[in-house]
Each structure stands twice: as structure tokens, then as C-alpha cells.
Image: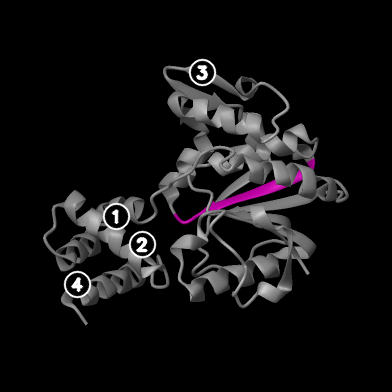
Amino acid sequence: MERAEIELRLLIEAIYLKYSYDFRDYSGASIKRRVNHALSQFECKTISALQEKVLHDPAAFMQLLQLLTIPVSEMFRDPSHFRALRQEVVPLLKTYPSIKVWIAGCSTGEEVYSMAILLREEGLLDRTILYATDINPRSLDKARQGIFSLENVRAYTHNYQQAGGQRSFADYYTAAYGYAIFDKSLCDNVTFADHSLATDSVFSETQLISCRNVLIYFNKKLQDRAFGLFHESLCHRGFLALGNKETLDFSAYGNQFEALVKPERIYRKS
């Protein structure tokens, strides 16, 4: 085994032992790429030097965490996915007296606000509780604030329209100083919480789980653990929405779900 490989393993193990963040079953290529990027950011010549820094300085670890969990998100990303949710899933959600939705790996909140807007337009938001979870506390803080760059909002507006949006997207935010501040009432029923798919367990029965573009960073063992949590959390015939590069095929839980809208990676618990 190469020295860098050994150092990487030791760093990941040290992070788990010291801070209880578990990256041991994340995709090797993804973690390696991010740690190599961190070396230049921290001006460390070796992974061992980076390990020493983060073990002795919690603030440095928090900095590293931002690099290991780089949030890449946008509102109504993959508009056809949200259109499929609106057309195929929402009519069935309307049959429940109350609804719980879990957005796993919510990052900086773009997915949360997209879902809240969709549910409001369909008359469901008032009877829905949303759980928005992530392992990165800084991302959760940003999600709670609901403030996004106006530059990005232009793209979000286009996505919203393509996703079947029913109003002017500008109705949902106030523009000020180059930022869009989203309507706080969208999050009246949202609980933002720290939760790791690698180490934590299920906390509620849900009707819909959205976990998009998170599992691509996991190895197969950790993907199966996440699918197990989702299966346990979902009510009978509940819905699971994944990212466009993710699939239940070949997983240990593949036969526990059926494809509702296969091209959009929307599944239903068997």
C-alpha cells in the first residue's frame, strides 16, 4: 500500500475517533480528491501534517469539514424530477391527512425551499412536517437563513418554470443588496437537524424521502446502510426520490422498492 493511501486511511480514522464524523465508507476517489484539495488550502505538504493540524485544532477540522462535504446544489435542480413529483407523487400524498417529508443531505437548503414551494402550490405545506438533515452544521445554518445570491436565483427561476411552477418565482423572495431573502413562512414546518447517514438511525415515520446526489459519494456498503434507513423510515407504500446518477438497482434493497418514475429515480416502497 502506498504511503499516501496509508496516511489517508489514518486521517479518516482519526477524524472518526476524535470528532465522530464517519467518512470511512465514502467513495475513495471522492475523498482522495477533496483531501488533496485541502492540502493546498491548508498549505500542508503531507496528509500526516493535515491530520496533526485538525487533531489539535477543532476550528481547522471545521474548515476541513467544509471541504469534505462541498455543498453543490440549486433550487429545482433537474426540473423534470420536480415535475414528476408534482404529477405522480403529490396526488397520492394528498390522500394522507398529514405528511412527513425527510430531505436527507439537505446541504445549504436549496432542495428544502424547492420542496416547500412545490408543497405550498399544491396546498399541502400546512399539513406537512419537513425534516431537513445534513452532517455539516455550517450548511444547516445557511439553510436556516434562506438567503441566496441573486446571481444564482436567475437560474433557479428558469428551473422553477421548467418544473411546472404556478406563480412568479419572485413572489417567494425579497431582493436586497444582491441577495434573495426567501419567505420565512416556507420554513414554518421545517426542522433542521444534524444527522449522519453513516452513523445515525431513523427518527420518524415519513411518507416521502428526498436524498439527491448524496449517495454518489458513498461506497456500496454505506449506500446500502442509507437505503436501509430509508426503508425503515418510510411508511407502507412511501416514496423515495434519488438523484439522477443514483439507483436502487444492484443494492441490497432493490427488491424492496418499485420504480414509480424510473427515468427520474422516483421509487415506491413495495
Q: Could you tell me which secondary element the residue under label 2 belongs to?
A: helix
- Tell me residue 189's x, y (percent): 68, 41
Tell me the amino acid under the disc marked 1: Leu
Residue beneath label 1, please? Answer: 64
Mark 2 / mark 1, whichever is N-terminal: 2
Vertically, is 75 above or below 254?
Answer: above
Q: CA distance from mark 1 to mark 3?
A: 32 Å
Mark 4 / mark 1, whichever is N-terminal: 4
Q: Quadrant of the N terminus?
A: bottom left
In the rendered structure, which segment of residues is drawn in magenta? 127-135
Mark 4 / mark 3, whichever is N-terminal: 4
The reply to whether dot 4 and dot 3 touch (C-beta < 8 Å) is no
| For residue 270, side relative to residue 244 (left or right) | right
Tell me the amino acid under the disc marked 3: Ala
The reply to whether dot 1 and dot 3 touch (C-beta < 8 Å) is no
Mark 4 / mark 2, whichever is N-terminal: 4
Mark 1 / mark 3, whichever is N-terminal: 1
Mark 2 / mark 3, whichever is N-terminal: 2
> Can you tell which mark lies on residue 4?
4
Residue beneath label 3, please? Answer: 175
Is residue 188 in view? no
> Can you tell which mark lies on residue 30?
2
